[in-house]
Image (tube, rainbow, N blue to C red):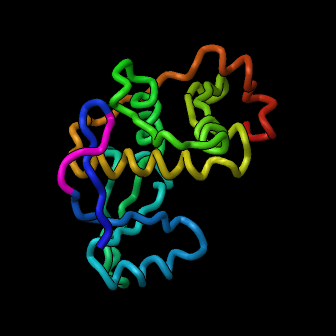
Amino acid sequence: EARVYPATEDGTEAGEPVGVTGLWIDCGGPRWNEIYQLAQTDNRIHPTKGSAHKRRFMVAERVQKNHGIVLWEIDTEKSKDQLHRLIHDQNALRWMVHRDINPDYGSQMSAESKIYDPRKRTETWVEIVKNNNHLWDCEQMQCAVAWRLGAGAPEPVAVAANPSAEKTANPLNYRGRW
């Protein structure tokens, strides 16, 4: 059985090992059926996917009767806002990364940005670097799961787009998305 060690306030590992209580797997791709089948084998395995629309809460659990599992639908706008706030919190202990991260992690973690679309008068998260945001997706999913499991964070509020983002990533010319 897998074990993890809780961290102390200074970020070092300490204490007794804790058993892993769950595995959350993104099933938003073409292999969703395999993930559903895996979830049927162990109630600690939870399929997740980004919601197609905004949700009242960050995570909604939807029973998939035909498959006998519960799908965790994540409002990715909320979870990305939560991740952004944790990363930029003045308390560095709110978001701690492993000491051995590599440049690819940094690149993927900065692959999305929140920009303002003046035509729609809305803010939205967009990929700045196409198809290189897998670790960002994993981290925002981790935020959503932690929130749903009661890790102490209140329901997230929206993060405002960086005022300079409109100048640096003009949505009107942004790869034809607007």
Q: Position of residue 104 (x, y in %)?
A: 66, 44
Task: Point out the image quarter for the C terminus.
Answer: top right
The residue shown at (60%, 14%) is 163
Q: Position of residue 41 (x, y in %)?
A: 33, 85
The residue shown at (80%, 40%) is 176
Relative to 90, is 127 on the left or the right? right
Relative to 100, is 90 on the left or the right? left
The reply to whether residue 165 is visible in this rendering is yes
The answer to which image quadrant residue 121 occupies is top right
Q: Number of labelled discs?
A: 0
Relative to 36, is 69 on the left or the right? left
The residue shown at (34%, 22%) is 91
The reply to whether residue 126 is visible in this rendering is no
Q: Position of residue 165 (x, y in %)?
A: 66, 21
Q: Foreground residue, 68 or 24?
A: 24
Q: Foreground residue, 23 or 8?
A: 8
Compared with residue 176, is residue 161 higher up or lower down, i.e. above or below?
Answer: above
Q: Foreground residue, 82 or 167?
A: 82
State the predominant SS element of the stretch in magenta.
Answer: loop
The answer to which image quadrant residue 102 occupies is top right
Compared with residue 166, is residue 36 higher up or lower down, i.e. above or below?
Answer: below
Q: Position of residue 90 (x, y in %)?
A: 38, 18
The residue shown at (41%, 39%) is 78
Relative to 79, is 151 on the left or the right? left
The magenta segment? 11-16
Q: Is residue 25 magenta?
A: no
Task: Point out the image quarter for the N terminus.
Answer: bottom left
